[in-house]
Image (spheres, rainbow, N blue to C red):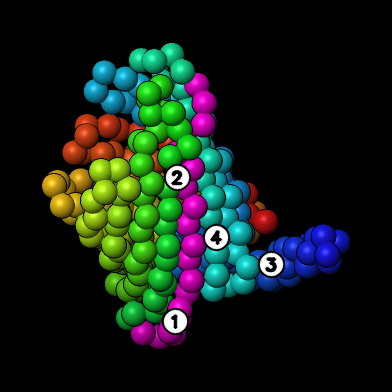
Amino acid sequence: MKKILFVIIVLTTCINFYAQETQDIDPSKPTNLYTQINTLGEVSLGNGFNTYGSRINFQYAFNPDNLILAEVPLLYNDATQSFGLSDVRVRYFHALKRYTDQKVFAIAPFADVTMPTGDAQKGLGADTWSLAGGVVVGVMLSEKASLFPGLSYVYLTEPEISGVGLQTNLSYSFSKRTFLFVNPIATFLENQTIWTGEFNLNHIVTPNKFKINIGWYPNFTNEIHAIRGGATFFL
């Protein structure tokens, strides 16, 4: 059974690789799903502490419409002088509908889980499960600009509160190889509103193979600002 599973995985990867070789991929649209590995270095500046480390982000596309993502962060907190695994995130995307020659070109439901794998006492985790489910819609604004608004239900196990998450992710392509994501995010919980954002500049070095990126990921509510930079390898 293990040998059969291994052969299926190898064949699926080869098919994905061949498909990407025959047609240039377009990672400027989050609803386009590709198998890839992202390696990121990170510096996060907080109120009374800083963290440094890396994130490894593996995304596997079973087919053009289904993808699972796993993000593994390894961080050092200078306030507690601790290094280790932070909270691991797992996400699933499904491109439910795709349309051509229309303003709304994609509808993609998703499930998002962040696990409390980091030690909160050492400043490496949030000590709560974060469970979310929602949908992202792709809207074509122009040849260079697309909007990906998203709506989700969010539940935190500690302190057992729930709410609604909103995002308005804008993708702007300066060229076929360079694009920018601007994504303000608001999470409306029962007792507070959390304002965060993602501002991520990407450049494709080798089409279908390799890109680099640098981004600013602020948490305005908690006054934490993260800078991440790294590389993506498409498989």
Residue drawn 46% across and 18% down? 82
Q: In which quadrant will I find the N terminus?
A: bottom right
Secondary structure category for the residue under label 4 = strand
Q: Nearer the viewer's eye, disc 2 or disc 1?
A: 2
The mark nearer the N terminus, 2 or 3, is 3
**Looking at the image, residue 159 lies above or below residue 97:** above
Q: From the viewer's side, name the closer residue of 204 and 61.
A: 61
Q: Which residues are magenta?
A: 83-102
Is 114 colored magenta in this rendering? Answer: no
Work out whether residue 4 or residue 73 is closer to the camera in this orientation and state it. Answer: 4
Measuring from the top left, give residue 78's x and y in whole percent. 40, 16
> Callout 3 environment at 10 Å: few (<14), some (14 to 19), or many (20+)?
some
C-alpha gap between disc 3 and disc 1: 20 Å
Q: Earlier in the sequence, mark 3 or mark 4?
A: 3
Q: Is residue 197 left or right of residue 211?
A: left
Q: In the rendered image, which residue does mark 1 sit on?
A: 97
Amino acid type of the residue tagged 3 in the rendering:
Asn
- Residue pointed to by mark 4: 68
Q: Residues within 10 Å of mark 2 (few under 14, many from 20)?
A: some
Which residue is tagged 3? 16
The answer for how far apart the CA atoms under marks 3 and 4 are is 15 Å
Q: Is residue 84 magenta?
A: yes
Using the numbered discs, state the Cα–Cα distance from disc 2 to disc 1 in whole angstroms. 29 Å
**Residue 211 marker:** none
Residue 156 position in % (x across, y down): 30, 49
Instruction: Classify mark 4: residues with Cα within 10 Å, few (<14), some (14-19) or many (20+).
Output: many
Residue beneath the point at 40% across and 22% down: 122
Q: Main secondary structure of the magenta part?
A: strand
Nearer the observer: mark 4 or 2; the answer is 2
